[in-house]
Amino acid sequence: MRSIRRKTAHRSPHRRILPKQLANGILGFPDAAPLALVTEYLYHPNDTVRQYASLGLAYWPDSEIIRPLTELLHTCGPTDVVVKQTFRMPGAVDFNPAVPAIRSDNPVLMCGAVTGVTRLLFADPPLLSAEPEPKML
């Protein structure tokens, strides 16, 4: 019992690093270069790595990440974390280019496509309008 008290008594209060401080030390400033590094891991085959990278996106304001994530969705396809980040607001994204990923051999893209379709169908408030789009003549 004494040894535990001695060990905890000598710990410096400065040794605790808060997540925000850690992000500042690794990522520097929330600009394009670190964002490109983080978004690269949104396509990692390991689910934990993708989730961790997704949490790292909280370092940037939503207004700065929605466009790059939407571009990724259209160019690289959907992943579960990209879909969750981009499908947060009605009208935020057009999912049509990502639908073919449902037939993908890549399990990460297929999971993202299924996540996207599920979110489109069951979101509250709805992400899709119930009104049919007017046809252009």
Image (cartoon, rainbow, N blue to C red):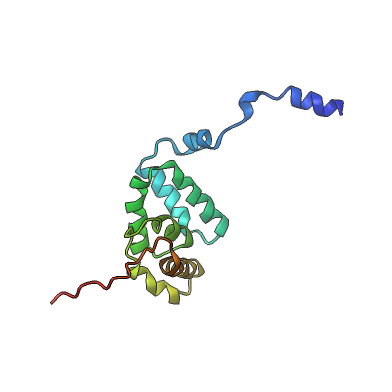
To which quarter of the image does residue 46 belong?
A: bottom right
As drawn, the residue found furthest toward the left would be 137
Quarter containing the C terminus? bottom left
Q: Residue 83 at x, y = what percent?
A: 43, 60
Give left or right: position of 47 versus 31. right
Number of numbered discs present? 0
Quarter containing the N terminus? top right
In the image, residue 125 above or below residue 3: below
The residue at the point 75 percent across, 27 percent down is 8
Give left or right: position of 121 versus 131. right
The residue at the point 35 percent across, 52 percent down is 66
Q: Nearer the viewer, residue 9 or 92?
A: 92
The residue at the point 45 percent across, 62 percent down is 79
Give left or right: position of 75 versus 83. left
Q: Nearer the viewer, residue 109 or 99?
A: 99
As drawn, the residue found furthest toward the right would be 1
Q: Residue 39 at x, y = what percent?
A: 42, 52
Q: Nearer the viewer, residue 78 or 120?
A: 120
To which quarter of the image does residue 135 belong?
A: bottom left
Q: Residue 29 at x, y = what percent?
A: 40, 36
In the image, residue 42 above or below residue 18: below
Q: Residue 40 at x, y = what percent?
A: 44, 54
In the image, residue 51 above or below residue 4: below
